[in-house]
Image: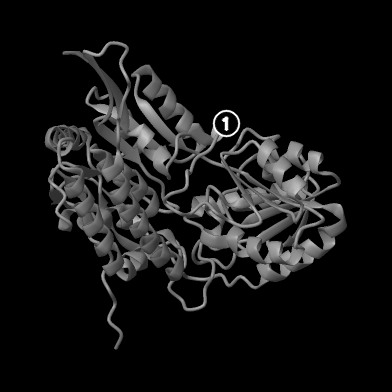
Amino acid sequence: MTQTLPYETLCQYIDGEFIGVGSGASQPVFNPADGSLLGSLPSGNGDDVTRAIAAAQRAFGSWRHESPLRRSDILRRAAALMRERASEIGRNITLDQGKPLAEAIGEVNGSAEHAEWHAEEGRRIYGRVIPPRLPEVRQLVVREPIGVCAAISPWNFPFNQALRKVTAALASGCTVVLKGPAEAPSAVCALARLFHDAGLPPGCLNVVWGPAEAISQQLIESPVVRMLSFTGSVPVGKHLAALAGRHMKRTTMELGGHAPVIVCADADVERAADLLAPYKFRNAGQVCVSPTRFMVQRPVLERFTERFLERVRAVRVGPGLEPGVTMGPVASERRLGEMQAFADDARATGGELLTGGRRIGTCGSFFEPTVVLNPRAQSRLMRDEPFGPMAAIVPFDDLDEAIALANSLPFGLASYAFTRSVHNAHRVATLIEAGMVNINHFGMAPAEIPFGGIKDSGFGSEGGTETFDSYLVTKFVTQLN
């Protein structure tokens, strides 16, 4: 008989203590593949948030002065534990978030590399000496941790997105209060256990759950919290950024995208289609950098579309724990309704649905991988980010036309282009309005690479050495001897 493994024990984590479901309120957590109840998530209140902030403030007093070598050692131990527990954590991510097991385990293992990278780079936070104008004066520039940080992370990559924020803050000498995604909470609870077991001092990391709007407002309005890192939708990000601005809080915003793809006539069309199809439908398209608006030059439109459809139709949809599944459910019934609304609107406004466009079955939140040819400019699909398994293919004649279409929306996170021409590649790299431009491949995952957008897609970076700019303040010291 096969033993059924337990789901993650859900909890808050405040000042080094795990607080489970007790007499307070709780929220059910469901499996999007079959609607079954997985567990109950404790719902904290304002007092819990106050305790978490106080714990983070108290811990900051010592953590900021801790040796970078010891901070590095703790992050490295946490990374090792991630790899040891990747299968268990990945399984629970598949249960509450829905992605295939291989993707979920890969998310955890990839996060371990981020922890290791921050462990090393945190040892290299240097200042500088400015040559003085007078011999008896010394002039120094030092970089110091900003203080207590608030982090709000999303459900689509529940482990990786939380981990990026936590490791950047801790490596900088900051402490954190983290609000994770209630829809897929197991990863954040597992993250707290990892750092606890790695020896992170109490209060350096705190995890709270509860009403998102109330918690966000309390964190931002607290005079103790000096920085907010948020990943989520554009409307919520704008609201939080405005609130933070009223309190002079530094922010990092990684918001939505509607990533354009330009496939030029001189590209390796078959290779482009082979790369783009699985990339589009990983995590059921619920990826902020997911390629969505495919602009294909007219001479290769038919070739690309046929090859792309061939690869899309090979996507196997099902529960993420089933062997061979390459796309799981969307995250919830609400997302399922949104996808159906996008498909119906594309049809109604004159787009041609080449494949997909419907819910799969009646159990679970499964939606067909969907491709729409030539959707109209006024359709929702060409204006709003679908954040799901849906791609739009639009023909273009010359590169300037494609670039103008790519830049026509207020989003500016990721973008993609395929071409053999150095001239075309240079024009795309120069003229596309996006924080990240990928030409002939996908190069945004490594820890050492800046990760962030422009325009309505946010500001700041959650990768590369630029990450530390959000968590450090600059102090100038001048001394007359």
**Residue 67 shows in this picture:** yes
**Residue nearest the observer in this picture, 132 or 106:** 132
Residue 383 appears at what percent x and percent y?
Answer: 67, 39
| Displayed quadrant of residue 24 | top left
Q: Residues within 10 Å of mark 1 (few under 14, many from 20)?
A: some
Quarter that holds the C terminus = top left
**Residue nearest the observer in this picture, 431 or 7:** 431
Type of the residue with mark 1 = Lys
Q: Which residue is mark 1?
A: 455
Question: Considering the numbered disc 1 on the image, is that residue within a helix, a strand or a loop?
Answer: helix
Residue 402 appears at what percent x and percent y?
Answer: 77, 42
**Residue nearest the observer in this picture, 336 or 60:** 60
Q: Is residue 283 above or below residue 427?
A: below
The residue drawn where x is 78% and y is 53% is: 264
The residue drawn where x is 37% and y is 33% is: 469
The residue drawn where x is 44% and y is 67% is: 34
Residue at the bottom extreme? Answer: 1
The type of colouring in the image is one colour
Quarter that holds the N terminus = bottom left
Classify residue 377 as left or right of residue 204.
right
Classify residue 175 as left or right of residue 89.
left
